[in-house]
Amino acid sequence: MSGKSAINKEVFTPHDEKMLAAVQVKRRTKKKIPFLATGGQGDYMTFICLSVTNKKPTSVSLTKVKQFPGSSGFVKRSQWTIDQLRQINGIDSSKDCPEFDLVFDNAFDQWVAGSAGEKCTFIQILHHTCQRYISARKPEFVNCQSKLLGEDEGVDSVLFRCKVLMKRVRKELVAHPGHLLRRGNSILHSAADSVTSAVQKASQALNERGERLGRAEERTADMMNSAEQFSVTAHKLAMKHKN
């Protein structure tokens, strides 16, 4: 399970929330903190996560999540509602870069993402989410490349191919349970990995073409959950035929 999937499962799912996007970040400027119980600045991993509640009325939040050394778990730190977000600064609208700033009512953070691609994907999804869920005063997106704020052409066709792949694998497993049993758990992992890989490649391709992934990210998150459930079902089917 990837780090971001683990964050969703550990931090958001128990509170009936769904993580739409996450980006691993580091501060561009260090805060002057005289003492940290964790052992000092930079001694942990930080993620900025965008999430939405499953139940209505819908609530959207940006959450700072940290993972400290020696721990496999994640800790929720600061959290803001999307209505508290005032500005997203992409730093340079002329080229891809990993830096960005987030300005809230009561906070201002300067970040650098793990890569320019991760930052671009996060801002694309954040922009779409703001347009979808904020009806009054929307946050300002400044110094952002136009491709990050554009329409998501081609998303539906890519997602359709992913769904077709999932259905095809499911059909094969149901039609040939004996084959599944002979090959054991490897085919279960292969099936889930195939769907996961398709989703990741689709997201990467769309990002490289500068297409927004907001609506796609929500649907791919659902597909990833479906792939997990599918793997469990296939395993139960194998055990049934074994007995």
Image (cartoon, rainbow, N blue to C red):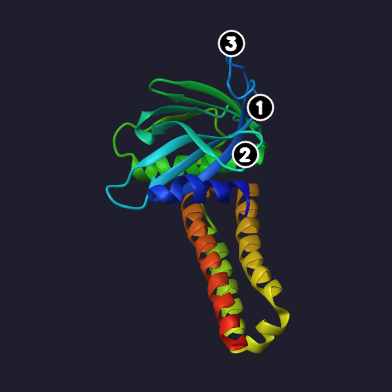
The residue carrying pointer 3 sits among few (fewer than 14), some (14 to 19) or many (20 or more) residues within 10 Å by Cα, namely: few
Mark 1 highlights which residue?
A: 43
Residue 193 vs 62, above or below: the answer is below
Residue 167 lies in what quarter of the image? bottom right
Relative depth, front residue between 117 and 93: 117
Q: Position of residue 206 (x, y in %)?
A: 60, 52
Of the two numbered discs 2 and 3 in the rendering, the one whose residue sits closer to the viewer: 2
> What percent of the width, then of the height, locates residue 185?
68, 73
Q: Label 2's element?
A: loop
Please report whichever mark, 2 or 1, sits nearer to the chain's N-terminal start. Answer: 1
State which quarter of the image contains the N terminus.
bottom right
Q: Inspect this view and state whether residue 147 appears.
A: no
Residue type at mark 1 is Asp
Residue at 66% across / 27% down in the picture? 43
Q: Upstream in the sequence, badge 1 or badge 3?
A: 3
Left or right: residue 126 versus residue 81 is right
The image's mark for residue 101 is none
Q: Quadrant of the C terminus?
A: bottom right
Residue 25 x, y percent position in the rendering:
61, 32
The kind of residue on which mark 2 rests is Ser
Q: Furthest residue to the front?
A: 243
Residue in view at x 28 percent, y 51 percent: 56
Q: Please, what secondary structure does the residue beneath circle 3 have? A: loop
Rendered residue at 44%/36% (across/down):
62
184 up-or-down from 8: above or below: below
The residue where tag 3 is placed is 34
